[in-house]
Image (spheres, grey):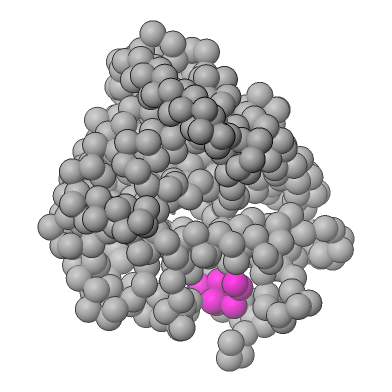
Amino acid sequence: MSNWKINSWRDYPVKHVPDYPDQAELDQVLNKIRTFPPLVFAGETRHLKSQLADVVDGKAFLLQGGDCAESFAEFNPDYIRDTFKLILQMSLVLTYSASLPVVKVGRIAGQFSKPRSSPVEVKDGVELPSYLGDNINGIEFNEKARIPDPKRLFKAYSQAAATLNLIRAFSHGGFADLKKVHTWNLGFIKNTPEAKKFKELEDNIEKALAFMDACGINSDFNRRLKTVNFWTSHEGLHLPYEEAMTRTDSTTGENHDTSAHFVWIGDRTRQLDGGHVEFCRGIENPIGIKCGPTLEPQDLINLCNKINPQNEKGKITLISRFGHDKVSKFLPKLIRAIKKEGLNVIWSCDPCHGNTIKATSGFKTRPFNDVLKEVKNVFECHQSEGSYAGGLHIELTGQNVTECTGGAQKITDEDLSSRYHTHCDPRLNANQALELAFLISDEIKKNSSYSKNAVQAAS
Ligand code: PEP
Ligand code: CO
């Protein structure tokens, strides 16, 4: 990797990284974090990359989801469990109906820093610096809370470590055993059409497991029936923190950002000559790139070549997020450019970030129908361009929130204030997320290239 160093990003312009009033205190915190244990290990990132390589080949599907921003206030084991349950439920829907393995990645255990559309927030004529995420400053609207405080990085690191610890226990300690599928249900989604459909699926799985058990194949003998791989990810926005978490693997000399298995570059920080791209080109982790309406095909090619000069499969995930009515204008030209260059990428769809609106009630929301439309349009586009729509990237929560309008519960503008808890963007609740999973499994079944690959993968 020519001229790359763990800190070479500091020689480039960097957007959306906070200015700390006390630089010496920040350095002290970062030096301490450098000595803390890694959260993930080099072998794990390699394993994830190999699973993602299967997605590139159309043999698996990538499901990535979680909070827009994790917060200190919403840190409790039930919330972690419910997000985990919901992602398991969604992936079961996809695996069962589309016969495709699902690579499960949470926006969790480190998803704190936020790029904001405006550096300031104005309320009742008072202007303050914007909230930037709990690892940087406080959401309370007062001057003191909004000052970036390096000590918050420690707290976020500890929260990420404890969250990941629980996820590892859930993934490998029996909770994810397929025999326990009925315990993955979230109480409040009973009696909805999605819950009924999921119950049918549960019953079918139970029958299949009983049959396999009778044949002597069960989770006592097959680890894969009782454990899952659940990977972590976040936007690699706070470069000083990411740098402090980056370690050189003693066995290979490779550099791994050990803050998460997968990091992505946001739509606002993907400048070819910016610090975020410079940092990401030197780490071995799989990298996501958000692709919004301002991304030109040639810039995308340059980005991929810079971050993945060897064209390694599983290294790059392109996460398109245009808005439901802009997909057909922007996505086909990017798909064609990538195809023409022969670049190995996963095409994932983020149907959330291009569909955020301000409701008349003043809340930021996402009409669920627009989210569904973006997914449908993206699948159609890939179908007609002959490429593989291999992933979904969404903001969701396992809590019964009212943040996005529509869906089976028919959440209205007036309902938003009832349970609006997000620290940043509005998230799909469990009903809406499951509805989306059922829709995607239908789309996958419709797309002939999926069935062809699934058959190949199974054979
Ligand atoms: C996000 O994923 O939380 C985000 C800010 O997305 P984008 O960079 O696509 O706007
Ligand atoms: Co967001």
In front of the other: 307 or 20:
307
Q: Residue at x 68, y 75 (%)?
A: 255
**Percent position (x, y) of residue 330?**
21, 60
- Regarding residue 107, the answer to whether it shows in the image is no
Prevailing SS of the magenta stretch? helix
Residue 105 percent coordinates (x, y)? 53, 48
Q: From the viewer's perspective, is 160 left or right of 100?
A: right
In which quadrant of the rendered view does residue 12 lie? bottom right
Q: Is residue 280 magenta?
A: yes
Task: Work out which quarter of the rendered image holds the N terminus and state it.
Answer: bottom right
Asked whether residue 181 is in view, the answer is: yes
Q: Does residue 115 lie above or below 426 as drawn?
A: below
Magenta stretch: give its range.
Answer: 277-284
Look at the image and tell me in which quarter the C terminus lies: bottom left
Q: Position of residue 17 (x, y in %)?
A: 60, 60
Q: Position of residue 315 (x, y in %)?
A: 48, 69
Q: 139 left or right of 318?
A: right
